[in-house]
């Protein structure tokens, strides 16, 4: 399977703390994306980083990409209870489909 | 435009019955994707269309599955002779042309299928 893997599988933190999730993949990529999924709902696109970029910010989100290690991380700063969700990384090798990872389930405790 | 719409939201069916799901993408998006997601897992690719052409099908898509996008707008996913293993969330997403894939997908809320 070309599916990526995420670490940790589950994460529980207190509101206000930072949350870090990691993603590894196996193939060459054109870009890597992060999505959020609230329980039983569809996925929401959060941020995309291109293969020639190393770091990207969007609001409280910070994404890094290390293509030599085939890995990425998502940092959510100053977490809120509303950030409770599953987070998935997804990679694309070109202009075709996106392949999703296994996800990290984040719980932010008020 | 209200985003990607999927119908129905939930479907319960008896084993052996046929089911059909519908996806209405964002109107200017010419790419449409179907994914399947089981509990605790990430979405798995099933198939995708560029306009009305089905460009790729996953090996997950057995002969019992068929997808169409007849006029390059909405799409349907049909499962014939459903099995309990087909129980999952079926997700539809759309995007602009692959050359603009750098903007990510827009997903619908999904159709949850339960086969009893």
Image: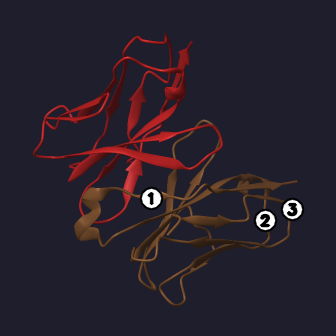
Q: Chain of mark 3?
A: B
Q: Which chain is brown?
A: B
Kind of element beneath mark 3: loop
Who's the residue at 41% across and 45% down the image?
A3
Q: Residues within 10 Å of mark 2 (few under 14, many from 20)?
A: many
User: Which residue lies under the disc numbered 1?
Assistant: B106
A54 left or right of A8? left
Q: Please state which of residues B110 and B57 is positioned toward the viewer in this rendering.
A: B110
In the picture shown, does residue A75 fall above or below A95? above
Kind of element beneath mark 2: loop
The percent coordinates of residue B10 (x first, y second) are: 77, 57
User: Which residue lies under the disc numbered 2?
Assistant: B82
In front: mark 1 or mark 3?
1
| Residue furthest out toward the left | A52
The percent coordinates of residue A66 (x first, y second) are: 17, 33
Q: Residues within 10 Å of mark 1 (few under 14, many from 20)?
A: many
Who's the residue at 37% across and 17% down the image?
A78
Q: Please state which of residues B43 and A50 is positioned toward the viewer in this rendering.
A: A50
The percent coordinates of residue A5 (x first, y second) are: 40, 34
Give me the disc on residue B15: 3
Q: Colour of chain A?
A: red
Who's the residue at 48% across and 21% down the image?
A80
Contact (Cβ within 8 Å) of mark 2 with mark 3: yes
């Amino acid at each position: 399977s070309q599916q990526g893997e995420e670490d940790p599988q589950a994460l529980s933190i207190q509101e206000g703390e930072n949350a870090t999730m990691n993603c590894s993949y196996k193939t060459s990529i054109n870009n890597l994306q992060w999505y959020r999924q609230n329980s039983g709902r569809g996925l929401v696109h959060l941020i995309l980083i291109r293969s020639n970029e190393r770091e990207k910010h969007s609001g409280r989100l910070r994404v890094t990409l290390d293509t030599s290690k085939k890995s990425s991380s998502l940092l959510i700063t100053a977490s809120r209870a509303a950030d409770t969700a599953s987070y998935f990384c997804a990679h694309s090798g070109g202009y075709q489909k996106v392949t999703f990872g296994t996800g990290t389930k984040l719980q932010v405790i008020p | 435009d209200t985003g990607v719409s999927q119908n129905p939201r939930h479907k319960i069916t008896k084993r052996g019955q046929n089911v059909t799901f519908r996806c209405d993408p964002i109107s200017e998006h010419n790419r449409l994707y179907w994914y399947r997601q089981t509990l605790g897992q990430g979405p798995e690719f099933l198939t995708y269309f560029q306009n009305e052409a089905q460009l790729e099908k996953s090996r997950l898509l057995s002969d019992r599955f068929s997808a169409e996008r007849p006029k390059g707008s909405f799409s349907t996913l049909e499962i014939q002779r459903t099995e309990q293993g087909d129980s999952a969330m079926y997700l539809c997403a759309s995007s602009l042309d692959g050359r603009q894939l750098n903007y990510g997908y827009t997903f619908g809320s999904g159709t949850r299928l339960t086969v009893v």
